[in-house]
């Protein structure tokens, strides 16, 4: 099955009771048993729910995995992965992670005796220097947020295999339409479903997809034991969102290219970060592991003035100033004061996250209107 067909059909069967073509919202906490233990495979909705099952199967197929697991947020999904580890275990993590992931690792799991090494992974051989006999997991995200760095997943997976550690990839920015980490050797794919998979800025959810049965069993045990599971209404909304994932991603990527083309020649723009640009430092790897380059773009202003960045952010019509990304509508964000405010200024400057950095989540509106909006805001 090709991707567009999977987006419509994967995991979704007509409802066995009525033949309903769309998976019903099984809004129930529990299921009737004829006598103790005599049930139809469903006991309690934290453990199993038919609406969630359909979504989990759909996600597993989209990522070319075998098992999908949904969580009440992206962070709850990441939390479940780290709970596979024991005190004394070590993790090598990319140094340019979603801020909430960094916070979960450093403020919550460090307390329980898990040690994290944060490493620049654009050159994957750096990973190996931080691996020792306690290393159990490599965690990375690509493209990264907001600097749009690209990490070589296949290269990282070779290192993980050599040292017998798990490799987990946060695939939120790329989505399974642009990139499939399991095919490149990763063991776990993680998504903030909140973003492109949901796609309509109306759900908070997370997911994991794996191929290995034992790994699935361990994660499902944590999913049920810790209990951060999503409700059926949210699962239904995501099942609906996924039906247009391929169309949306195609348009996000087309619009991304047009906007990157406009910004790259604009006199006020200093650095432009989009992996589809030939002069992007990891463009070659992006071309090898991604099918297109998506709609996430960051840029800085000449002179690096925060005040000037603010003026631009306040004068948009269609780019809405908000946290989050990946919805049908275009959003804009000021990472230094919004999504990445918890990173000390010296640290963020080191990775290029300057005061004037503006991050765009390019939506699926008409590109001409978006470009006119950017032009007006930059030239006001
Ligand atoms: C948003 C995001 C997360 C966290 O997901 P939530 O659904 O907000 O909990 C993790 N990783 C990336 C790359 C994200 O953009």
Image: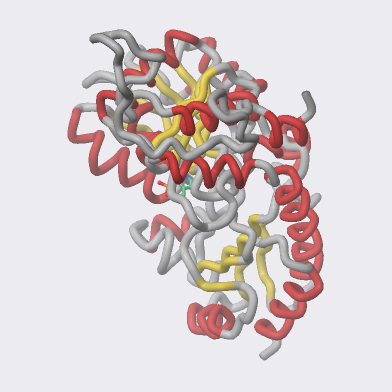
Who is closer to the viewer here, 269 or 111?
111
Which image quarter: residue 85?
A: top left
Who is closer to the viewer here, 62 or 183?
62
Q: Is residue 253 left or right of residue 218?
A: right
The residue located at (69%, 35%) in the rendering is 7
The correct choice, above or below, for 49 with respect to 272 in the image is above
Q: Is residue 247 left or right of residue 214?
A: right
Q: Is residue 135 left or right of residue 16?
A: left
The correct choice, above or below, for 297 with respect to 20 in the image is below
Q: Looking at this view, name the residue that lies furthest to the bottom.
A: 380
Which image quarter: residue 219?
A: top left
Residue 195: x and y in percent read 54, 50
The residue located at (47%, 37%) in the rendering is 94
Residue 346: x and y in percent read 39, 60
Residue 294: x and y in percent read 70, 50
The residue located at (32%, 24%) in the rendering is 31
How many discs appear?
Answer: 0
Residue 52 makes an appearance in the image:
yes
Who is closer to the viewer here, 155 or 181?
181
């Amino acid at each position: 099955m090709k991707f567009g067909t999977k987006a419509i059909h994967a995991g979704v069967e007509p409802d066995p009771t009525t033949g309903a073509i769309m998976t019903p919202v099984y809004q129930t906490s529990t299921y009737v048993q004829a006598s103790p233990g005599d049930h139809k495979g469903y006991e309690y909705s934290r453990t199993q729910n038919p609406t969630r099952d359909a979504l989990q199967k759909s996600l597993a197929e989209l990522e070319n995995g075998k098992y999908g697991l949904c969580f009440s947020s992206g962070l709850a999904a990441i939390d479940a992965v780290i709970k596979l580890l024991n005190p004394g275990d070590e993790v090598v993590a990319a140094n340019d992670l979603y801020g909430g992931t960094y916070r979960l690792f450093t403020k919550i799991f460090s307390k329980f005796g898990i040690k994290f090494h944060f490493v620049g992974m654009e050159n994957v051989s750096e990973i190996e220097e931080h691996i020792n006999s306690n290393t159990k997991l490599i965690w990375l995200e690509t493209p990264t947020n907001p600097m749009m760095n690209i990490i070589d997943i296949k290269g990282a997976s070779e290192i993980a295999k050599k040292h017998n550690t798990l490799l987990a990839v946060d695939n939120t920015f790329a989505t399974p339409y642009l990139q499939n980490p399991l095919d490149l050797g990763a063991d776990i794919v993680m998504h903030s479903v909140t973003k492109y998979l949901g796609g309509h800025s109306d759900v908070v959810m997370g997911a994991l997809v794996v191929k290995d049965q034992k790994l699935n069993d361990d994660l499902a045990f944590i999913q049920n034991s810790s209990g951060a599971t999503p409700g059926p209404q949210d699962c239904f909304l995501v099942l609906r969102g996924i039906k247009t994932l391929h169309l949306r991603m195609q348009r996000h990527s087309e619009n991304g290219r047009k906007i990157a083309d406009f910004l790259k020649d604009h006199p006020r723009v200093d650095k432009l970060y989009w992996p589809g640009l030939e002069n992007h430092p990891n463009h070659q790897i992006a071309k090898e592991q991604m099918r297109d380059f998506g709609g996430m773009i960051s840029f800085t202003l000449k002179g690096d003035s925060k005040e000037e960045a603010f003026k631009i952010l306040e004068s948009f019509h269609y780019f809405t100033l908000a946290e989050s990304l990946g919805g049908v509508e275009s959003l804009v964000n000021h990472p230094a004061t919004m999504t990445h405010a918890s990173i000390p200024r010296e640290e963020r400057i080191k990775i290029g996250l300057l005061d004037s950095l503006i991050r765009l989540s390019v939506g699926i509106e008409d590109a001409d209107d978006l470009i006119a909006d950017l032009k007006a805001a930059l030239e006001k």
